[in-house]
Image: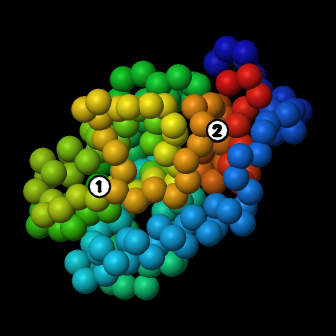
Amino acid sequence: MSLEDTLSPADIQQVREEADLLHDEQTVEAALDRMAAAITGELADQNPLLLAVLVGGIVPAGKLVTRLEFPLQLDYVHATRYRGDVRGRSLHWLARPAQPLEKRAVLVVDDILDEGVTLAAILEHCRASGARSVYSAVLVDKAIGVRPGLQQADFRGLRVENRYVFGYGMDYRGYLRNAPGIYAVKGL
């Protein structure tokens, strides 16, 4: 299917039904608990600014923020390489943080780390904006081998094989972000 094709609800349902479940809801929630504990250990006394990376980072950030029982502020950034496609292209900024980053501890939360290009650019923007320290958290780290010179995440939830995944904020062509688990699309 090309991007010009209209996806019907039946098309999306078929993708969901044919997908392989990689991590069920219980496993994902346990990973979020572990991430929250690690983040608390590192940032509880730093009054951090948590930046959710839209759109995929909404779900992991929302799930994490309720587990972080210390003072923090919440904001967002919107930068993408996918724009509804299944392959990444150049980084496109749609929104930068509204809160000042200068002299702040910043935690950037995203759904998935694959090549690390998007996350690296966002973290560099935070540093260039004067953040005192910058951390990253991703729900899913994709096993794609060595990422020489590219970003690694400070806090990671789960690892998945190098396939196209959806659920818990990650999408398939703009859909299935709400799937209650992490799935791999058949054939991708």
For residue 6, above or below residue 42? above
On the rendered structure, is 37 left or right of 47? right
Q: Residue 127, relative to residue 62: is it above or below? A: above
What residue is at 36 percent from the left and 51 percent from the top? 153
Instruction: Please provide percent x and percent y for residue 21.
Output: 77, 45
Q: Point out the tag, 2 or 1, that comes first from the N-terminus.
A: 1
Say which element carries label 1: loop
Q: Is residue 68 visible?
A: yes
- The residue that mark 2 highlights is 165
**Residue sitting at 25 percent across and 83 percent down?**
45
The N terminus sits in image quarter: top right
Residue type for callout 2: Val
Residue type of the residue flagged with mark 1 = Pro
Query: Does residue 59 lie above or below 71 as drawn?
Result: above
Give the spatial CA distance, label 2 vs label 1. 27 Å
* Residue 106 position in % (x across, y down): 26, 63
Could you classify mark 1 by the number of other residues whose Cα lies within 10 Å: few (under 14), some (14-19), or many (20 or more)?
some
Position of residue 54 relative to residue 6, above or below, is below
Q: Position of residue 149 (x, y in %)?
A: 25, 32
In this rendered view, identify the residue nearer to me: 104 or 157: 157
| Residue occupying the point 84% across, 29% down | 11
In the image, what residue occupies the spot 37% across and 37% down?
Answer: 116
Q: Is residue 99 left or right of residue 165?
A: left
Q: Relative to residue 16, is residue 53 drawn left or right?
A: left
